[in-house]
Amino acid sequence: MAAPELRSSRLLLRHWRPEDREPFAAMSADPQVMEHESPTLSSDRSDLLAEVIQLGLEERDYGFWAVEICDDARGDKTSFIGFVGLSVPVWEASFTPCVEIGWRLSRAHWGFGYATEAATQVLEYAFNVLRLSEVLSFTSLSNSRSMAVMHRLGMTRDENEDFDHPNLDLNESSCRHALFRMSDQRWTAR
């Protein structure tokens, strides 16, 4: 079953289109956007990642949806602004296997509540359609912007669960990660 489209008042979370590749490549080459991620990506690597993400949405009922603005009150003419969605980490940690929610938006679209709004739709889908019992999120301790989104979503953090990301060198400043959780019961009660 392919992943469905999701909507909020201002956003459409949809499958990827060929015209998303150019803005995604620009976003993936932006050092500020990629500061807490892997190194910036070349256009070819960005295109490959977009293809892999889209194939995932076609093969599963979740993944990283392309996000576009459907309420143009700001006068924004950009269709693709980034991605938000669910994934299953392929590395081992004390909390895996798990389902993670994550996001990446272009810098021009930071500070408007889009990440929180899109992630809210994804969590609604995760708990009400996929019937997941828990969704996790994690980021480098230095990524205060993403941690703020996790707080706005109502996710909880126990600092005793912070961890060193197994795919990063222990000497890297971004190695230590905060782990946030959202249970289905907490989501329903919020």
Image (cartoon, rainbow, N blue to C red):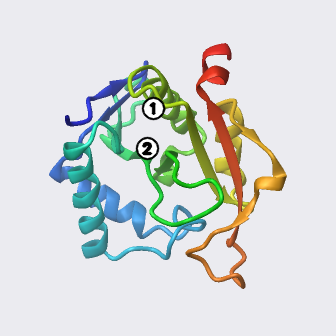
How many numbered markers are drawn?
2
Q: Position of residue 83 (x, y in %)?
A: 40, 46
Residue reaching furthest to the left: 18
Marks 1/2 in contact by CB < 8 Å: the verdict is: yes
**Taking 84 as reference, is 167 left or right?**
right
Q: Where is residue 93 in the image (x, y as percent from the top left)?
A: 61, 63
* Up/down of 60 relative to 55, above or below: above
Depth check: give the residue in front, 24 or 128: 128
Depth check: give the residue in front, 90 or 111: 90
Residue reaching furthest to the right: 160
Image quarter of the N terminus: top left
**Taking 148 as reference, is 132 left or right?**
left
Depth check: give the residue in front, 142 or 79: 142
Q: Position of residue 103 (x, y in %)?
A: 49, 48
Image quarter of the C terminus: top right
What's the residue type where badge 1 is placed?
Val
* Up/down of 29 relative to 12, above or below: below
Q: Upstream in the sequence, badge 1 or badge 2?
A: 2
User: Which residue was labeled with disc 1?
Assistant: 122
Label 1 neighbour load within 10 Å: few <14, some 14-19, many 20+: many
**What residue lies at 30% left-to-right and 73% top-to-bottom?**
45
Q: Position of residue 141 (x, y in %)?
A: 74, 61
Tell me which corner region of the image, top left, top right, bottom left or bottom right, holds residue 63: top left
Depth check: give the residue in front, 95 or 89: 95
Label 2 neighbour load within 10 Å: few <14, some 14-19, many 20+: many
**What residue lies at 49% left-to-right and 25% top-to-bottom?**
127
Tell me which corner region of the image, top left, top right, bottom left or bottom right, holds residue 133: top right
Q: What mark, if any, has residue 86 been given in the picture?
A: 2
